[in-house]
């Protein structure tokens, strides 16, 4: 008999978990408290308690080729960075293709997940749900929690003395939907992550003035990288990941600083991070430097105090007549349906083996999917997590001892602090390519480069020096997809397709840039020999 699996949440992690369950012959039931799929990526005008919420203009920070599921490329005419409505369309196509909706119980809230009395032998869970005011309970062989980490808005009002006197409007960024109604206002955005930067840029086009307060500064990157390709298809290659791993830390951090300042000098814009050698997640925004140049946005230091109408900053400056304060101060996550003894959240941190499994359970029948912030797309990350988890549930993969898992959790946390710092906003941060390979290794899906160098050298070179996309993890092992190799070699075609909307006349295929490089090299050689002749 197939094992029954409870999947909590029908966002991106829940959808891919459903598919992985079906692929492994498990019997999933998904509980989704809202009326539709999509989770955080489904825009709703009204903010609901306990629900993720986005503003209408949200666009992905990771490109379509680096974000799609491993055996289901996005349509080639889709733009490289997707508006939330376009991404939701992809989820709907995906769910229809693999017939996933039939496993989802909508408008059903999970009230509790508890071990069955015989858990030590059965590994089973009692799940209590509520729908239309009626409670029901059912026993499941395993549980996958896919409820995400954008759960509770974090508004540290105690850190802002005088907020109780402020006469203007203030709210958390999750309540922001669109710029209507903010025209002509003087607005202070507190927090310069991706949401804070997006909102500040959007409001600055019609507001009287926008200020953005940042405690530590931040690196700002464009979505557009070398030769106009998406940033993540250039940044996330195995070759570059290898360099970041083997080179001395000081060299790597120097390289990152040079790369970040290639677009614009962050120091000149007041944005340079306080600790620029911490690998904090950068802000992806193409408009921030332009809006700063225009004076529409002004960068400020930490808010020291608020008065009835003004903001006083740590550097002693004061901005008067503030009408609106938007707290883009992030989220805290919580699992109200779980006991603390199962997954305890402390200081916005949880203790999970490889960010997935509680280490202390007698049976490995519980997992959290998507409770992570990789320096890359969450979609392939959650997919590999789900592929591994479902094979553990099925008994095809096993976990190490509790002691080994606890040692890994401690060591991983120490490494995270060393790389990303101790900020509560970085508690789920991890390297991208390294983590994907680590998960793929668990299920036997990591590409074997030594073998490929002999059997398919062209593919081996593409895998190592090209974008580390999800298709690579379908070349071999369980869940092998026959279209994986083709998808890897046609990736560039799908990147360029939505850009080539104007037909151009055929031009010479010989690249001018290559000719200039050859001429430059010849000039250096000539100069070298001339120097020898004169010496």
Image (cartoon, helix red, strand yellow):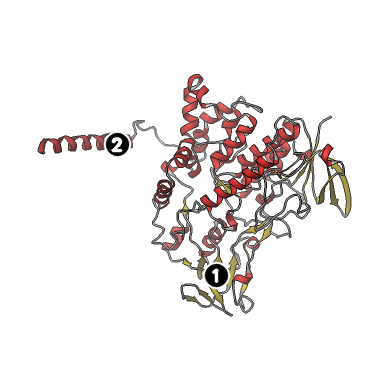
Please give left or right for residue 134 compared with residue 365 in the image.
right
Please report the residue visible at 57 percent of the width from the left and 58 percent of the height from the top.
423
From the viewer's side, name the closer residue of 359 and 228: 359
- Marking on residue 166: none
The mark nearer the N terminus, 2 or 1, is 1
Q: Quadrant of the N terminus?
A: top right
Please report the residue visible at 32 percent of the width from the left and 36 percent of the height from the top.
512
Q: Quadrant of the C terminus?
A: top left
Q: Decide: is 429 above or below 528.
A: below
Q: Which residue is mark 2?
A: 517
Residue 469: image location, x then y, percent: 55, 36
Q: Which residue is mark 1?
A: 187
Residue 380: image location, x then y, percent: 61, 39
Q: Quadrant of residue 306?
A: bottom right
Seen as rendered, the residue at the extreme top is 455
Residue 203: image location, x then y, percent: 54, 64
From the viewer's side, name the closer residue of 252 and 400: 400
Q: Decide: is 442 above or below 137.
A: above
Mark 1 crowdedness (10 Å alpha carbons): few <14, some 14-19, many ≥20? many
Seen as rendered, the residue at the extreme left is 534
Please give left or right for residue 429 compared with residue 1 in the image.
left
Please report the residue visible at 27 percent of the width from the left and 34 percent of the height from the top.
518
Q: From mark 2 to mark 1, how far is it between C-alphas?
A: 48 Å
Whether residue 21 is visible to the viewer of this picture, yes or no, is yes
Q: Decide: is 530 above or below 112.
A: above
Please report the residue visible at 49 percent of the width from the left and 34 percent of the height from the top.
492
Secondary structure of residue under mark 1:
strand
Q: Decide: is 307 above or below 295.
A: below
């Amino acid at each position: 008999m197939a094992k029954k699996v409870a999947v909590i949440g029908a966002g991106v992690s829940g959808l891919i978990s459903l598919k992985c369950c079906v692929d492994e012959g498990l019997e999933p039931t998904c509980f989704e408290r809202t009326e539709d799929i999509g989770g955080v990526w489904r825009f709703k005008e009204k903010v609901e308690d306990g629900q993720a919420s986005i503003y209408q203009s949200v666009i992905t920070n990771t490109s379509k080729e680096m974000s799609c599921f491993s055996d289901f490329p996005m349509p080639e005419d889709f733009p490289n960075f997707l508006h939330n409505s376009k991404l939701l369309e992809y989820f709907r196509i995906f769910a229809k293709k693999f017939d996933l909706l039939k496993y989802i119980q909508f408008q059903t809230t999970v009230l509790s997940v508890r071990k069955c009395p015989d858990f030590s032998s059965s590994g089973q869970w009692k799940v209590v749900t509520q729908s239309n005011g009626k409670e029901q309970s059912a026993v499941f062989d395993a549980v996958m929690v896919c409820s995400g980490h954008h759960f509770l808005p974090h508004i540290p009002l105690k850190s802002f003395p005088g907020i109780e006197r402020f006469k203007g409007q203030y709210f958390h960024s999750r309540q922001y939907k669109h710029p209507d109604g903010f025209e002509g206002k003087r607005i202070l955005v507190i927090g310069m992550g991706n949401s804070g930067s997006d909102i500040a840029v959007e409001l600055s086009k019609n507001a009287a003035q926008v200020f953005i307060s940042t405690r530590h500064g931040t690196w700002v990157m464009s979505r557009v990288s070398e030769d106009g390709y998406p940033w993540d298809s250039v940044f996330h290659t195995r070759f570059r990941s290898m360099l970041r791993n083997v080179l001395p830390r000081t060299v790597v951090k120097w390289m990152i600083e040079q790369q970040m300042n290639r677009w614009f000098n962050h120091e000149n814009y007041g944005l340079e991070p306080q600790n620029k050698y911490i690998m904090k997640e950068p802000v992806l925004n193409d408009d921030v430097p332009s809006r700063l140049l225009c004076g529409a946005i002004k960068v400020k230091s930490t808010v020291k105090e608020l008065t009835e109408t003004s903001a006083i900053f740590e550097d002693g400056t004061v901005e008067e007549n503030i009408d609106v304060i938007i707290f883009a101060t992030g989220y805290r996550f919580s699992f109200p349906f779980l006991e603390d003894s199962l997954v305890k959240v402390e200081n916005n941190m949880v203790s999970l083996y490889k960010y997935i499994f509680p280490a202390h359970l007698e049976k490995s029948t519980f997992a959290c999917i998507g409770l992570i912030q990789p320096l890359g797309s969450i979609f392939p990350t959650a997919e590999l997590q789900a592929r591994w988890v479902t094979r553990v549930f099925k008994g095809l993969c096993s976990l190490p001892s509790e002691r080994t898992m606890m040692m890994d959790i401690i060591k991983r946390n120490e490494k995270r602090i060393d790389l990303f710092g101790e900020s509560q906003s970085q508690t789920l941060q991890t390297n991208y390519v390294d983590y994907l390979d680590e998960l793929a290794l668990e299920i036997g899906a990591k590409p074997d480069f030594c073998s490929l160098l002999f059997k398919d050298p062209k593919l081996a070179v593409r895998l190592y020096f090209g974008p580390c996309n999800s298709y690579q993890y379908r070349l071999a092992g369980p869940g092998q997809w026959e279209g994986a190799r083709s998808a890897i070699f046609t990736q560039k075609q799908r990147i360029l397709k939505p850009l080539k909307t104007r037909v151009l006349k055929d031009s010479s295929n010989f690249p001018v840039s290559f000719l200039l490089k050859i001429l430059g090299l010849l000039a250096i050689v000539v100069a070298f020999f001339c120097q020898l002749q004169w010496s």
